[in-house]
Every structure is written in structure tokens, then in C-alpha cells.
Image (cartoon, rainbow, N blue to C red):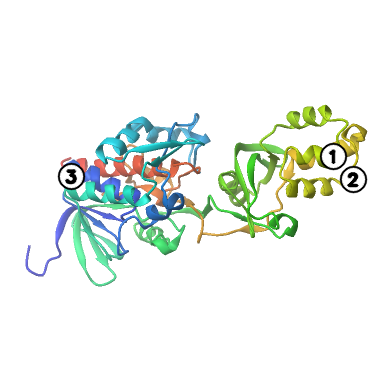
Amino acid sequence: MTASSPPSLDIAIVGAGAAGLMAAIWAARAGAKVALLEGQEKAGSKILISGGGRCNVLPIESRNPVEASFHSSSPTHVLKRFFKTWRLEQIQDFVRWDLNIPLAEEDDNKLFPESGKAREVRDALVQEAEQCGTTILYQYRVAAIEEQDGGFLVSAEDGRTLQAKKVILATGGESVPATGSDGFGYRLAKKLRHKCVQTFPALVPFTSADEDLTALSGLSLPVHWRAVIDGKEVAQGERSFLFTHKGFSGPAVLDASHYFLRDQAQILVSWQGYSPQDWVDYLQSVARRSVIKAVTDQLPSRLAAVLVERSGIRGDMRCGNLTKGNFEALHRQLCHFSLPISGHRGFAVAEVTGGGVPLESLQLSTLESRKTAGLYFCGEILDVFGDIGGFNYQWAFVSGRLAGESAAKSLSA
């Protein structure tokens, strides 16, 4: 190498988020000379704000089937392959023992660091990557990746360059662009012959123009939600729902959001998570009670008042005196309530990005590009995302490990 030649290494990983850090760890463990290129001043900016600064790092248990937790435009059987490569229990052991992070279980199938600090997760990943031999270059905003002599020339916006035999794109998507995930990874992918599935904000709060409902801001309760298209239920779940001054949020809304954005589904909720039959049985059991008292006994009073008013029934009417039409109107409000959604909060606050680089454009056993030899992908840049509850970290870890190990192994092939 002459004095003017750029530094050379085995693997350049673009993006030091959860997936990129995991790719670096496993590539370096396999003996590769690795550089992790981060455009921000620090690694893992998105990790630091996840879970309200506490970092819901993993779920406690996997859901079955896979599509109950993860979403992609690719067939389900394609997704299943990835999660067999590193099972959830093994990832949990890695976090506990390799990263030395004690984990605490919380309700709703969530694992958090016992410290309650997302910084512990970020710092442990960075420390492990560096101890394995990874060089992290900060404020290295990649401007171009060019194929060169069987490898790649990676150029930064400030003029720095380096040569790498393999490149892993772990740039994230477009959600929370203030952390560096502003979609530039898609532009790099397209210049390297990759098409992308149309992206959209996923796990995003809804907005609403319904002033009666936005006036309930701060109110939270469990709901059973359903996504319905042309009268057919396509998805459902039971989680917490939050009224906000702009609309609706909470885990139930975030999990349901992509069905509205991507598929134009109607989102229906049953308050308190009760089934339609639960509400029928309850209302019949309180025949002598007034409608408003009966509903208020089960729901927050402010919400109860709105629902009773919208049913068109006098609140002082006894439940036993309801006509069939009255009963059905009230029942619709209680367990088939259609959310009046006017829009969403966008990429600025979305937890993750839907769409991205399609899995079919990759070698599924390695995450290497079918279009550009030596180019690998992992994490949110791919057309995969998970529900709220640590599932997106699970995907970042699984895909990061697979890409990192595969890139390193290919060096000796």
C-alpha cells in the first residue's frame, strides 16, 4: 500500500445502531478486521431513546406463529428461516452473560435492563465490539460506496476513504431521523442495484380531528383491537391504548398502525379488552342499573359519557329497558368502536420503518446481496419490522449476527 492509498480492511459496516454493532461483534469474533462507520458523534443514538430511555431490549417469549410478531412483504416461510438461526433464548443468554446485562421481566412480555437505563445496553454493545477488535469511526458519514478490484471503496462526505473487501449496510430506516436514520441507506442500496419496497412509518401514533376524543388526553386503558378490510378481520391484538391531545397512541395503536397506513384497514376497538359476548353478558346482568352507571362501572367516566352519548341513548335509561336497536347501538360503541383516524405522526416519531430492501434480493442463508457480491444487509434497512415489545431488537440482533458472521466466513471462501 502506498502512502496515498486509503486504509484497507476486511469488512466495513455502515451504521453503529443495534444491528450494526451486533454485526461488528460477530464479524470481529470470527477474525475479520472490522471498521464500524457511524455518521453521528456517538453510536446507538436510537438505542438511547428507546423504551422511554429504558430500552425494552427483548421480549420474554416468542409468539407463534412468526407473523404474529414480525411483518414483511416477503412470505412468512422466509421470515421463519431467520429466527431459527439464533433463537430468542440464546439471544437472552448473550445479553445476560456476554454483554453482562442483568435483565428484569415486566408485564406484557417485556425484558428491560435491571438498571432501567438504555445507556447500559448501548455501552455494553460498543464495549464488546471494541474488545473484539472493531474500530469505530465516528462522524464518518458515508457518501458513496463503489465497487473496486473485487471489493469496495467507501467514501465519506468529508473526503475520507477506505477500502473494504466486504460491506454491511446497517444504516437503519427513516424513523426518528434526528438519530441519523434518515433514509440515506436506501440511496446507497439503490446505487448498488437494489430496488426498495415503498417505505412508510410503522409503530406510529395516529392523529384524530375528533375533539371529544382528544379531550380525553392522558386516559389509558386496555383494549382488544381489530384491523378490518372489506368486512374481513386481518389482524387483532390486546394491549394498552392511550388517548393523546393529538389522537391515539399506546402499544395497541402502534401495533395496529401499519394495517391502517399500508393496507387502509379500519381499526376497531373493544374497550377494556372485553369480548362482544362479555359486554352482552354484562349489560344483561345489570338490567336495573342506568346505562351511564353500568358503563361507568366498567370504563373511565369521561370515556363512558362520550360512548353513551354517541349511542344516542339517554344515560338515565335502565339497561333492562333498552330496545333491540338501543342495545345494538350501545354495543357497537363498547366493542366495535371505529377509531376516527385523520392521519399519523410520521417518521419523526415512528418507532421503526416499514418497507425497505426486500428479502428476495438477498441470499437468505447469509443476507448477502444477489445483485452485488460482497454486499450484506441487516436491521431496519430491510423490509422487516416487529411489534412493540423488544421484537425489533430481536430482529436487529438476529440479522446483525447472521450478516456479520457470513461476511467474515466469506473472506476465506
The CA distance from mark 3 to mark 1 is 71 Å
Label 3 crowd bin: few (<14), some (14–19), many (20+), radius 10 Å:
some
Residue identified by numbered label 1: 291
- Do the CB atoms of the residues marked 3 and 1 lie less than 8 Å apart? no
Instruction: Give the mark nearer the N terminus: 2 vs 1.
Output: 1
Residue type, mark 1 in image: Val
Instruction: Give the mark nearer the N terminus: 2 vs 3.
Output: 2
Q: Residue 94 appears in which quarter of the rendering? A: top left
Which of 324 and 155 lies nearest the eye of the viewer? 324
Label 1 crowd bin: few (<14), some (14–19), many (20+), radius 10 Å:
many
The CA distance from mark 2 to mark 1 is 8 Å
Residue identified by numbered label 2: 314
Residue type, mark 2 in image: Arg
302 over 228 or under it: above or below: below
User: Image quadrant for the N terminus?
Assistant: bottom left
Q: Which residue is drawn at 50% across and 44% down?
A: 388
Query: Secondary structure under badge 1?
Result: helix
Residue identified by numbered label 3: 411
